[in-house]
Amino acid sequence: MPNSPSRHWGLDQIVADLRASREALHRTRHPRGIRELPSRTAIVGIVENLRAVMFPTHYGTPDLTDESVDYYVGQTLENTLRLLCEQVLRALRFLPEHVDTPRPELETLAFEITRSFGTQLPNIRAMLVSDIQAAHAGDPAAQHITEILLCYPGVLAIMHHRLAHALHQLGVPLLARFINEIAHSATGIDIHPGAQIGRSFFIDHGTGVVIGETAIIGERVRVYQAVTLGAKSFPADADGALVKGHARHPIVEDDVVIYAGATILGRVTIGRGAVIGGNVWLTHSVAPGTNVSQGNVREGGRADDPAQPRARVRR
C-alpha cells in the first residue's frame, strides 16, 4: 500500500489513549511501578536445564559419557541456579512483605532461597523416580523408563509440580505458578504448586486433570484423565472478597485410584485404598477400601433437571 500524506493511522491519539488507560483508567501495573517482571522464556529454560541436571541421559546432551556427565551436571547447575536466582529476586518484589525491603537484602534472600532449592534437587529426583516407576508399573502399555520420561504428559506435569512445589514452600509463589502454567499449557494438566503430593504418583493420559491448591494426596495414588480435585464453595469476607488460602480441596489417602472424569469437591477425605469410578461426582468423604461407581441416572427427570448420576457405594 503506497504511503501518502493523506493516509495516517492517527497514532498520536491511539498512543495517548493507551497511556491514559495504562496510567489512570485501567491500571494493571504494580502499585510501585515494578518493571522487572519474571521472564517466562527464562523460566522455561531453567526448568529444561533442571530436568537435564536430574536426568542427564534423557534430557542432557547426547554426547555425555561416564567421565563427562558430572562436569556437565555441575556446569549446567551453576548456570541454571544463577539464572534462577535472578528470577527469584524479581518474583520476591511482588510479595507484600517485601514492598519496602531494600534491594541488597532481597538479593541476599534470593540467593539463600535458590541455594536451599538446589540442595533439594536430589530429594526431588528421588520422588520423581518413584513417580516414573509407578507409571511403569501402572500402565501395561509402558515399554520402558525411557518411553515414560520422553513421552508421558503426566510425568512431565509432575516433574514441573515437584520443582514448583519446592519453590512455593520456599516462599516464591509467583515463580511456582509460572512453572505450573508452563506444564499446564504443554499437557492440559493443571496442578497448583501448593498441592501436597506423596511418592509414586501416576497420572495416566492426563488431559483435563485439575488439582487444587490445598489438595493433599498420599502415596501410590493413581488418577486418570479429566479428574478434578476441586473446591465446592468459595467463602467471602465481609467486603465480598474471596478468602484466600483456607483448606477447600480434597484429601486423598494412600493407594487410591480415581478413574476418568471423576469430580471430587470440597474438604472431603477419600480413604486409603478406595476406588472412585469414572464420572462419579463426590462432595462427601469416602471410607477406606470403598468402591464408588456411577449409579443410574434418576428416572423421571424434568427437562431442566441436570439428572446428575448418583454414586453407588460398595464396601
Image (cartoon, rainbow, N blue to C red):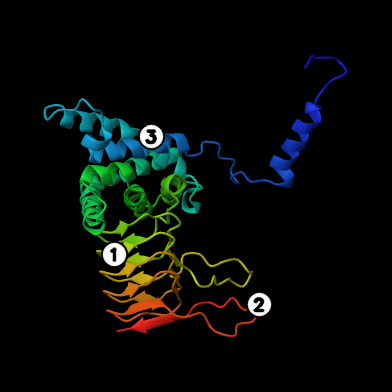
Give the percent coordinates (x, y) of residue 202.
Answer: 30, 58
**Where on the picture, by quarter, is residue 56?**
top left
**Where on the picture, by quarter, is residue 312?**
bottom left
User: For residue 306, which numbered disc appears in the image?
Assistant: none
- Gap in Å between the C-alphas at discs 1 and 2? 37 Å
Give the percent coordinates (x, y) of residue 211.
Answer: 42, 61
**Residue picked out by circle 3:** 45
Amino acid type, mark 2: Asp
107 w.r.t. 210: above or below: above
Mark 3 or 2, closer to the camera: 2
Q: Give the structural element (helix, strand or loop) at label 3.
A: helix
282 w.r.t. 198: above or below: below
Sooner in the amino-acid sequence: mark 3 or mark 1? 3
Amino acid type, mark 3: Gly
**Residue picked out by circle 1:** 221
Q: Give the structural element (helix, strand or loop) at label 1.
A: loop
Give the percent coordinates (x, y) of residue 100.
Answer: 50, 47
**Residue picked out by circle 2:** 304
Residue 81 in view here: no
Quarter holding the N terminus is top right
**Foreground pick, 132 / 99:** 132
